[in-house]
Image: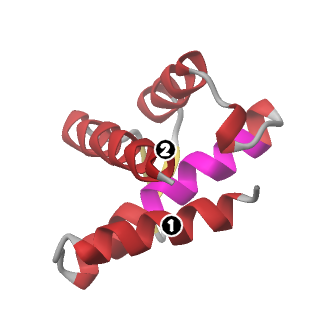
Amino acid sequence: MSCEHFLDQFKTKLNTEGLRGQTVRSYITDAQQYCEWLDKYRGISVENASQGDAKAFLKYLKEEIHELRPGKFGTYSLSTIRRKIGVLKRFYYAILEE
């Protein structure tokens, strides 16, 4: 299945939890970033990813320079990485429920 399918499933799950729209959008953006990273750097889809892939993604977030917002580059803060860890957990829980 495509990552879009899993992202839609995740969004549906988040919307049933009563989260604010901006929170849902942020969580979807984080999960989409992970899916895109898996495709670009690992050549796999989310359903074929391992725990090692998730750890490599988090290392990538911590160590590589990213465009944090238009025109601003740097590494992600520890609090942002922790949020992304939480999002990945929720993402996998949501897609495994199906």
What amino acid does circle 1 point to? Gln
> Is residue 49 at all visible to an observer of this figure?
yes
Q: Is residue 18 left or right of residue 54?
A: left
For the point 46% across and 35% down, which residue is it? 61
Camera-side residue: 24 or 40?
24
Secondary structure of the residue carrying tag 1 is: helix
Q: Which residue is disc 2 drawn over? A: 96
What amino acid does circle 2 point to? Leu
Up the image or down, 63 lies above or below 38; here it is above
For the point 36% across and 62% down, which residue is it? 27
Check if residue 38 falls in the magenta segment.
Answer: yes
Q: Which residues are magenta?
A: 29-39
Query: Could you tell which of marks 1 and 2 lies nearer the N-terminus?
Result: 1
> Is residue 72 at all visible to an observer of this figure?
no
Q: Which residue is disc 1 drawn over? A: 9
Residue 17 image position (x, y, % from top left) = 20, 70
For the point 44% across and 63% down, which residue is it? 10
Q: Is residue 68 left or right of residue 21?
A: right
Q: Which quadrant is home to the N terminus? A: bottom right
Check if residue 83 falls in the magenta segment.
Answer: no
Up the image or down, 62 lies above or below 97; here it is above
Q: Is residue 53 left or right of residue 92?
A: right
Q: Where, by quadrant of the figure, is residue 93 drawn? A: top left
